[in-house]
Image (cartoon, rainbow, N blue to C red):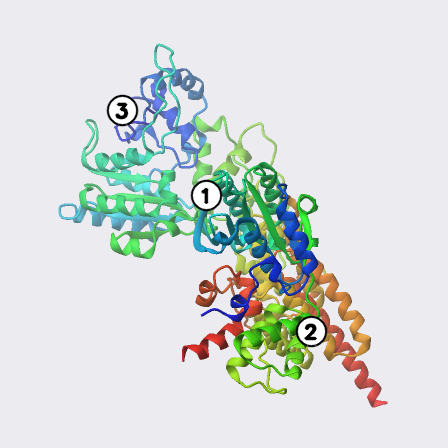
Amino acid sequence: MALWVDKHRPRELSKLDYHKEQAENLRNLCQQGDFPHLMFYGPSGAGKKTRIMCLLRELYGAGVERLRNETMTFTTPSNRKVEVMTVGSNYHLEVNPSDAGIYDRVVVIDLIKQVAQTHQIDAAGQREFKVIVLSEVDELTKDAQHALRRTMEKYVATCRIILSVNSTSRVIPAIRSRCLGIRVAAPNEEEITTVLQLTCKREGLTLPAEFSKRIVEKSEHNLRRALLMLEACKVQQYPFTGQQDIVELDWQVFLRETANQIVTEQTPAKLEKIRDRLYELLAQGVPPDMIFRGLVEELVRNCDMSLKAKTLEYATLYEHRMQNGAKHIFHLEAFVAQFMNIYKKFMSESMMMDDF
Amino acid sequence: MTTRKRAWNNSAFANCTKSDSCAETVVVDNDAETVPSNDLTGEAKIIGNNEKQQTTKTVSKSLKNTPNWIDIFEPSMSDDVAVHPKKLAELQNWLLHCEAVHKQHPAQICLLTGPSGAGKTAAARVLTRSMKYEWQEWINPVDRDFINTLGDQTSSYNGSQLDLFKSFLFRSSRYKSLFGREKRLVIVEDFPNIILSNTDTFENILEEYSKYGKSPLLFIVTDSKTRSLNVSYNLFTEQVKNKYHINHISFNPIAVTLMQKAMKRFCTLMKTPQLADTYCVPSQTIIDSIIIAAQGDVRNAIINLHFASIKGAGTLPIERLESGEVKGKSKKKMSTLKTIRRDESVTMMHALGRVFNPKHLPNGSFIHKPEDITDSFTSEPKRFINLIHANYLPHFKDIEHIVEAGDALSIADNIISEYREDALAVTALNLAVRSIMVANQTPVSAWLPIRAPTRNQQGFGPKSQQMTGISTNLYATDYGSYVHIIQGVKKI
């Protein structure tokens, strides 16, 4: 059973639903013998991975779609075994090195070495290089990124690397300058609507315009999320009605509830409860920057105009520290404490005003 | 081939006098940690092979005039040992028990633990001597290429240390040496390195020993604060202790009264004619400060006493202790040694208490300075900061004060992330400790048990494993809740 997101994913560059001009450019890129390292960047759910897969098909033909899963084991210098799941075909290998946590450096080096040390079997009929697809490269540690930079240069004869990145700001300049950057912007509302309608048509469903509009709004320009949302709604209730409930992501609900709790009570005991909730989110695997962002958005929505500027000021301060630091919870908690403090002060001041 | 290869052999020189025993020097230079053996009693000696003897003979000449001074103070009777009599009796009972069951179960095993300088080895030595046991100790061989007589560089193969250790254990427990006594006690104080990292091998050795060993076996292990280095914790788990019926005797740091008694004995020893020309007994104040500075470590006390009393040396600088808590009862000035003092050992829990509930002097400064607390934990700053973070919240009354503390912890985390510079870690720890102490203006005093820091383990659910090619982060943020709905209903 495949999810709609996977089932209706375009497989060829010519069949992409949007950014068609870019698709044409990518196809031209494949025609030439000189294929550079690539870096696809853009927000989550914009279609980076789809484009990468289409590009690989353009390069190697349908063979790249015969995928196999493999668990690769790497040994760190400290003799610890790190297991990483990879997906690959005869021509390419796809891996998310940030899954290895702090051992990502070993994964990056060893993986590329393993792949790059062997040449393509049939060099005549094929390209002379293999492709390694690395996703979420911006989550890699600086150490691993520097290792990647070196290995990219070293094995350029036998392999090309395609990086998939959310934000280029977290990729070191040395890697950025070695790749051809390809920006995949998030689809706009009409584009998402067309894709949703098209998917429903293929599934043989009817989608009311009002409902699709609401899904588009909810999805925050994330096509993957929009499609998953649509499928979940279909499971819950079909035929669609304009006002039917849209399933929300549970971590977002959880985060909103957390923000509400912060506003209701500002005591050390409450802060401790909030910390537990934040820990829970982190343990679920929600990235800390998304937690931070969601939290700030909810808090700002709940508070007075005069507090908004101050809140954002603290948010920027601690978010920056979080990026530099190691323990995310320290910074999240410090931010919550700051907000509680200013909110409490504000409330007691406004109470005094009321008394007059 | 190593210098220590036949460590279990009793030395043929054991009965020789000190002047021509080269074995003495060998023991001294490798065994600084333990109280070295006194050769006059005819204990097992560790000797080198012939080559080694040739080289050390010249050295021993020069050492002869200055005997190992720590030996002088070694206790010779059980009354002289500074260990608490009850603990000593415990060890003695074990030895008696060994004798009693020698016919049926000769391979009794005992584990002797305690902090450094608690008199573990000294106690064991005195008892073995008084109970007429032969002391057979394992000392890790030193890897050294030896040059054969022709001067060629030959085999650098030294054999497995583990094999050597095993054969030492079994042979020394089974076969008595030609000159030795009937009863033998096998001592392991120096563990082969491989065993420390490999607990399974150790269990195997114990297993074999308990089957085939013929003598009681005594392990002497010094307690250490860090768990990873703690031999008794890592090797002698409860399970192991139960399985092989290991008798665990734990020594405490030496109490002040016992230490005073020991110091008195040392002073009388110093007055004896053969030592009087080297030593002159220092003043009582100095002796008292030595006792305080040593903090239950008798070896440390001996070393300090040596330097305090050696002729021609200046007096040791003394520092007065601020005795805030002593109330009128004893007006005696407490003082400790200024320079060569053992660091006060503070447990982590204790230090955390000092951080969360800081005590002030009348003039407003802290009794326990943040610097001192920091200094005690420079080896594991990260752990301490995490512990502070996990526990600081309940100690605060006001959110206003938390702001400062939280802010400082966040900066500390940033500083400590720069792992390339060790000094920064200490700075971060200092910052965290200091800011918590300063920020907490109205500490909550209640019973607040310390909690361990939460480990952030990502939940690798079974679902995310099924969806290959999707990272855990992505699964959590986008897929998780929807896939749950979609698949959950479709299954039905």
Question: Which class describes the residues within 10 Å of circle 1: few (<14), some (14-19), or many (20+)?
Answer: many
Frontmost of labels 1 and 2 is 2
Which quarter of the image is occupied by the N terminus of chain A? bottom left
In the rendered view, would you say B384 is above or below B108? below
Comes first in the chain, label 3 or label 2:
3
Give the secondary structure at mark 3: loop
In the rendered view, would you say B190 is above or below A270? above
**Circle 3 chain:** B
In the image as oriented, which residue stretches furthest toward the right? A356
Frontmost of labels 3 and 2 is 2
User: Which residue carries the number 3 mark?
Assistant: B15
Q: Residue at x 30, y 28 (%)?
A: B45
In the rendered view, would you say B485 is above or below A180? below
Q: Position of residue A154 (x, y in %)?
A: 58, 36
Q: Which mark is residue B298?
A: 1
Mark 3 → mark 2, Cα distance in angstroms: 75 Å
Q: Is residue B327 visible?
A: no
Q: Amino acid at mark 2?
A: Asp
Determine if marks 3 and 2 fall on one subunit.
Answer: yes
Comes first in the chain, label 1 or label 3:
3
User: Which residue carries the number 2 mark?
Assistant: B398
Q: Amino acid at mark 3?
A: Asn
Give the secondary structure at mark 1: helix
